[in-house]
Amino acid sequence: MRILAVDPGSTRIGLAISDPTGAIANPLTVVAHVSRLVDAAAVAELARENEAGLIVIGQSLDDAGQPTFEGRRAARFAEALKSQTVLPVVFWEEAFTTQDARHARIQMNVTRKNRSGHLDSLAATILLQSYLDAHPQPS
């Protein structure tokens, strides 16, 4: 089963998709933020087009395990998305995905000049791979 990951941001929404076996995460695209309902419709359509069976939304939590401001925004986005699709929508802790994406670019020897720009789809890929590693699909 393919799984779609969503890394919601205030400006852009990063998306990643798993391979058909649900083992490997790959960057998909970035959706520019318009409004919660428009964004949710776009994500639901991409999930349908890519034959996803599950949508994972990154949610940031504080030290006490409670959603942060961004985490509460992700929860509101998830509610809008649930009204646009019949697919199950789950949350996954997204701690440090953007920092991990930045570090990954450094490890890949991407020049400082080329490291600038958005990391949204790479952050979504890191989020999704973390989810896939914790939830291996039965063979």
Image (tube, rainbow, N blue to C red):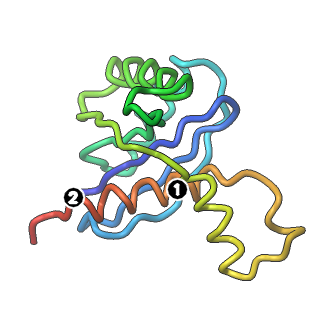
**Which one is nearer the viewer's eye here, 70 or 11?**
70
> Which circle marks residue 67 in the picture?
none
Which image quadrant for residue 87?
top left
**Mark 2: few/some/many CA within 10 Å (<14, 14-19, 20+):** few
Q: Amino acid at mark 1?
A: Leu
Question: Would you place residue 82 above or below residue 61 in this image?
Answer: above
Q: For numbered disc 2, what is the local secondary structure? A: loop
The tag earlier along the polypeptide, 1 or 2, is 1
**Mark 1: few/some/many CA within 10 Å (<14, 14-19, 20+):** many
> Percent position (x, y) of residue 35?
61, 18
> Percent position (x, y) of residue 125?
49, 59
Q: Amino acid at mark 2?
A: His
Q: Residue at x 56, y 54 (%)?
A: 123
**Mark 1 to mark 2: distance in Å?**
20 Å
Q: Is residue 4 left or right of residue 138?
A: right
- What residue does disc 1 label? 28
> Percent position (x, y) of residue 92?
36, 43
**Which one is nearer the viewer's eye here, 130 or 42?**
130
> Percent position (x, y) of residue 111?
84, 76
Q: Residue at x 38, y 51 (%)?
A: 50
Q: For numbered disc 1, what is the local secondary structure? A: strand
**Which one is nearer the viewer's eye here, 64 or 101?**
64
Q: Residue at x 36, y 61 (%)?
A: 18
